[in-house]
Image (cartoon, rainbow, N blue to C red):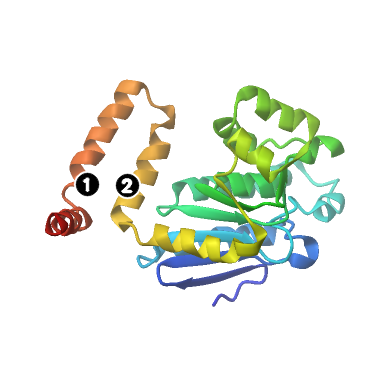
């Protein structure tokens, strides 16, 4: 178990479980929590036994977004200070994309603002049927500026701008329709369904998962030709791995 103050961390049987642990504040984000979360992600990335990262919030909500109390207490701060704090959040989203293992966000309750950004920056999102998602920053004269880059890659341009401009909070069903999440799980079987999903994912080849994630996001800014060439390189390298050789051997024995 971890010694963090606002995040909990535990790794076992190939699954690193990271929990935002400020339930009394609906897991609102402050600089300490962001720093601890980034450290926990680095810890899981360095652990060769970890095959999947499970990210969730303690209590009723996943994350209510940035802790507005800290903003209110520091309205007279310098632009450089605000920029450094913003870059901590930006660094977190990049850490998630660069993490070598799949990150699965499990959302119960609300995932709003920066919390919605963290959830949708994960590689996959499992949501309770009662979960809610949104970017309500516009309602306080703020901008979901950092998470916008993630949102634009997930949903259509019109949907993305609607969410940003209206600050609407949407249901899990709408989030699934928009393409923001992967699955909606029923409350009655939520925990068992989550465990089944991540356990199955953790049973896959570590090297294949790592290469798949790296290639998937690396091709974002590539031309079609460059992306196909990158795929050919990964295809060739994958054939040299022990996981592939064992997988082929296992398949041939079955047939």
Residue 49 in the image, given as x and y percentages of width and height = 36, 68
What residue sits 82% from the left and 51% below the top?
Answer: 68
Asked if disc 2 and disc 1 are in contact, CB closer than 8 Å, the reply is yes
Q: Sequence order check: which comes first, mark 2 or mark 1?
A: 2
What residue sits 56% from the left and 75% below the top?
Answer: 2
Name the quarter where the C terminus is drawn: bottom left
Residue designated by label 1: 238
Q: Secondary structure at mark 2?
A: helix
Cα distance between the residues tagged 2 and 1 = 8 Å
Res. 42 in view: no
Q: Report the number of discs.
A: 2
What residue sits 35% from the left and 39% below the top?
Answer: 215
What residue sits 80% from the left and 30% below the top?
Answer: 166
Q: Quadrant of residue 33?
A: bottom right
Q: Which mark is residue 211?
A: 2
* Left-right relation of 255 to 121: left
Q: Which mark is residue 178?
A: none
């Amino acid at each position: 178990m971890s010694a963090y103050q606002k995040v909990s961390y535990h790794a076992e049987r190939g699954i690193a479980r990271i929990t935002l642990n400020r339930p009394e504040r609906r897991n609102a984000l402050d600089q300490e929590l962001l720093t601890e979360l980034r450290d926990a992600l680095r810890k899981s990335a360095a652990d060769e036994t970890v095959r999947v990262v499970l990210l969730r919030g303690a209590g009723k909500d996943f994350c209510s977004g940035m802790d507005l109390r800290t903003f209110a207490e520091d309205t007279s701060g310098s632009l450089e200070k605000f920029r450094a704090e913003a870059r901590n959040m930006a660094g977190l989203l990049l850490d998630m994309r660069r993490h070598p293992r799949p990150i699965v966000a499990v959302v119960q309750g609300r995932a709003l603002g920066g919390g919605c950004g963290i959830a949708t920056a994960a590689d996959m999102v499992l949501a309770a049927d009662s979960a809610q998602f949104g970017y309500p920053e516009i309602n306080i004269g703020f901008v979901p500026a950092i998470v916008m880059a993630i949102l634009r890659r997930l949903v259509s341009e019109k949907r993305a701008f609607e969410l940003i401009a209206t600050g609407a909070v949407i249901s899990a069903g709408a989030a699934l329709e928009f393409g923001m999440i992967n699955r909606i799980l029923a409350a009655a079987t939520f925990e068992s369904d989550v465990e089944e999903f991540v356990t199955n994912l953790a049973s896959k080849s570590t090297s294949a998962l790592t290469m798949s994630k790296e290639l998937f996001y690396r091709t974002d800014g590539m031309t079609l030709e460059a992306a196909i060439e990158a795929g050919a390189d990964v295809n060739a390298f994958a054939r040299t791995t022990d996981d592939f050789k064992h997988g082929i051997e296992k398949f041939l024995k079955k047939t």
